[in-house]
Image (cartoon, rainbow, N blue to C red):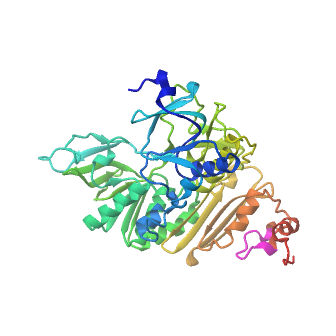
Amino acid sequence: MKDKNNIKEIYEIYDYIIIGNSAAGLAAAESIRELDSSGKIVILTEENYKNYSKPLITYYLEGLVDLEGIHFKGKDFYRNNNIDLHINKKVISIEADRDFLICSNEDIYKFKKLLIASGGQPIIPGIKTSCTDIAGGNRDKKGKLLDSINNENYRDIEGIYTLTTLDDALEIKSFIEKNDIRKVSILGGGLIGLKSAEALLGMGMNISIIELADRILAATFDREASFIVENRIISRGSNIYKNSTIEEIFIKDGSISGYRLQDGREEECSLLIIAVGVRPVTGFIKNNSVKIRRGIVVDDYMRTSIKNIYAAGDVVEARDMLLDEKRNIAIWPLAVRQGSIAGINMAGGSEKYNGGFFMNSIEILGIPTISMGLAAIDEKNEKNTEVVKVFNPEEKRYKKVVIRNNRVVGLIMVGNIERAGIYAGLIKNEIDISSVKGNISREYFGIINLPADYKKHLVTGEGIEV
């Protein structure tokens, strides 16, 4: 291995090193370059692509966008902004006390300022494996005997995938076409599982969703919202197994052939997507050099516990403005905003992150849905909280507005989400709605129904009359 004691002779010093080439990392690079036109910037990514929009990978799988359309920065972005991009560079260690990091190929990079925007990685639960072909043994596609799957070996079984990267989408697409797959199982009925379901159902697949909770999207939907979506999925001949998980995976000739659920039910399966969640990628941070809980803890300026190291995006715990606490909220818009603020502050500016809140939108078999903020809250267990609901299962429509201290803090809309942005504005700006509370759940609640002062703020401008 290269001599870490002579790092100045090994690699040049960068003013800014960014780990991660997605939403947060590129937003930070842009902000840095706006304030510092000459500082040396390098972006390190362990992937083999210039950039792509992770929210679009399921749309690529479904065929709604092509490989050109999946990029969110043009091919000249790095050159025009004088940014070095080093692909296939997996960071394995940060030596925070000496301002350098080490990659898996033993390259060493020294930094003045560092941004960690390494994102998240799929969680793979340990699941027992067994063989349906005694002669073949319980072996993966490389011939190695397995007792269970884990993060290290699940890819060695043909037909088991995750769906969080472009490589995942490419591999799944190829596998489906090669093997003429028409039925897919998804372990996990949360956001990643339902985004996967959205794409596969759009491809005409028959799916089975296995979810440990009592409903799909349990963290963001209540029972009424889940009811509408679940019925729609089941009506198309697919299955949802709730209050259950996979207890054992069957392997034959190195490929998945089926599984057994906790209740003893057995299902044939040649393609399984594991979507039980993601965890922040922090394994390269050694010796407690940077404060980590579930994710990297940052202050309001996106600084970590080390003064010249910042973090942003899916890897961090930052302020949730609704709960007034730090937690991990892994969504694209917040990653962009956090990255931009981190970049400004790395380049000498002083920009504060005022916090964010969860928001996600999924369309299942023609039913659009959106949830935001404290959407799944139960008013019976919360003080000073009101919940207003309008439920029309026949028309597959539902609206739930969560109000705390006369301010909207959560929303679920199913079937019609056209005015969701208005509610998002009320949440973000913490608007007192006491004067319009009686109209808050109306189907056509819009700008005209907003509190007068806030409405004037939104619509003032030349040619606009209130």
| Residue at screen point 50% across, 55% down | 51
Q: Is residue 110 visible?
A: yes
Which residue corresponds to the image point at 19% horizontal and 44% vertical from the top-left?
143
Q: Point out the residue furthest to the top here.
A: 5
Q: In this view of the protein, can residue 330 be seen by the observer?
A: no
The residue that appears at 43% across and 73% down in the rendered structure is 235
Relative to 87, is 364 above or below? below
Q: Is 391 left or right of 457, judged from the image as shown?
A: left
Where is 201 relative to 111, above or below?
A: below
In x, y percent, where is residue 32?
Answer: 66, 47
Instruction: Residue 127 in the image: state x and y as whole percent.
Output: 34, 44
How many marks can you see? 0
Depicted 296 relative to depicted 413: above or below = above
Quarter of the figure with residue 222: bottom right
Q: Which residues are magenta?
A: 438-448
Question: Viewed as shown, does residue 440 lie left or right of 453?
Answer: left
Q: Is residue 108 left or right of residue 391?
A: left
Magenta span: chief secondary structure: loop
Q: Is residue 440 magenta?
A: yes
For the point 46% across and 29% down, the residue is 10
Quarter occupied by residue 269: bottom left
Side (left or right) of 173 relative to 84: left
